[in-house]
Image (tube, rainbow, N blue to C red):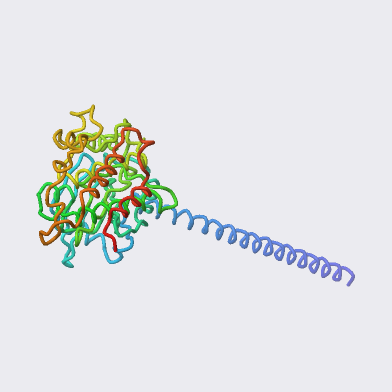
Amino acid sequence: MEKRHMIILIVTLSSTFVLLVILFLICVCTCRKKSLSTRNESCDKEANIEFKENVVEELEIKGDFIRFQGGEDLTCFDILDAPGEVIGKSSYGTLYRANLLSDSVLLLRFLRPACCTGKVQDVMQVVQLLGSIRHPNLVSLCGFYYGPRGEKLLVHPFYRRGNLAQFVRDENGDSHKWEVIYRISMGIARGLDHLHTGLQKPIIHGNLKSKNILLGRNYQPFVSDFGLHLLLNPTAAQEMLEDADVEGYKAPELTKMKDSSTESDIYNLGVILLELITGKEPINGKANPDQDFYLPASVRNAILERRMPEVYHPDVLKDSNGGSNPVNEDTIIKFVKLSLACCSPSPSTRPDIKQICKRLEELGPKS
């Protein structure tokens, strides 16, 4: 009997021990599973973040279309499949007139990949900045496409009247009317004023010339291409400056595009104002390195010798209906003097854009 009790006790103790071991193992497995689950969840979150970052990176590499105010309804299909007509070429890109299926017309600027070799992040920062700028006298950026092979396409509104260089060259009768000359001059100055003083940091245009002034209804001017040099690599930007020199718009102090300043923009503005009042295009700056401003010799000498009737077209002193005296010669002389001050060889003696706007306003019609 005593032996039997002993056996039962041993079996009971053994069973209890085995049960405790089993419970212990279950607890260990449960804790381990929970730990693994938490760890896996944490890894999943990290993987998720990494996946999202990779997706963003991949989108940037493959290309995407960014829309800005005025381009909210545009799509990649609209832009890339629109029939385009080449309307201009430069060393760094091509301009297209694009006819969309919706019957609207856009101006597309294609920048050659070899001319824009910066980091994607840097490009996007510049594009976001340019896309945020809005002013009645500045050409807005409606969209930007970054392609898989580095293609860059800027989307702008299209202005049917063409550019200021064409307007002056075509000898359009309106180009000799003071009210048109004044309206265009004032608009360009106000657009440049916004770039130089109306933003958190000044934006240097860098390539201001009559070809980059587009004309809308009633000859409202729109300054285009501002800040475009920020998207170009140093070689392409320097080529832009050399083109400006050939066309007669390079400020004398500039040797490199990276040295462009608000003062060099003012010089370019002065050349444009002279172009407007004389009706003559600037001449090759490289071929005339000793001149302070690049206008034909006859016009230049007439300005320097104050022979005003030889400087501007006789129709400047007529009104829209052919009558006389909408403006007197004293006003024209002040306009020419302001233009010459902008073209001063010394950057420090050029007026700033606020002073220019104020002087132009003083020359305007008195209400």
Taking depth in this image into account, of 105 and 191 the one nearest to the observer is 191
Task: Say if 248 sits above or below 138 in the image.
Answer: above
Taking depth in this image into account, of 119 and 233 the one nearest to the observer is 233
- Of the 4 image quadrants, the one containing the N terminus is bottom right
Q: Is residue 143 visible?
A: no
Residue positioned 10% across, 53% down in the render? 172
Residue closest to the far top? 290
Residue closest to the far right? 2
| Percent x, y of residue 252 | 29, 32
Based on the displayed image, in which of its 4 quarters is residue 260 positioned?
Answer: top left
- Of the 4 image quadrants, the one containing the C terminus is bottom left
Residue positioned 27% across, 56% down in the render? 364
| Percent x, y of residue 253 | 33, 31
Task: Say if 361 sits above or below 70 in the image.
Answer: above
| Percent x, y of residue 103 | 16, 66
Q: Is residue 74 visible?
A: yes
Residue positioned 25% across, 56% down in the render? 156
Q: Is residue 72 left or right of residue 160?
A: right
Q: How many marks?
A: 0
Task: Say if 5 sits above or below 38 in the image.
Answer: below
Taking depth in this image into account, of 289 and 43 the one nearest to the observer is 289
| Percent x, y of residue 319 | 15, 59
Q: Is residue 171 left or right of residue 134?
A: left
Task: Say if 266 sits above or below 16 in the image.
Answer: above
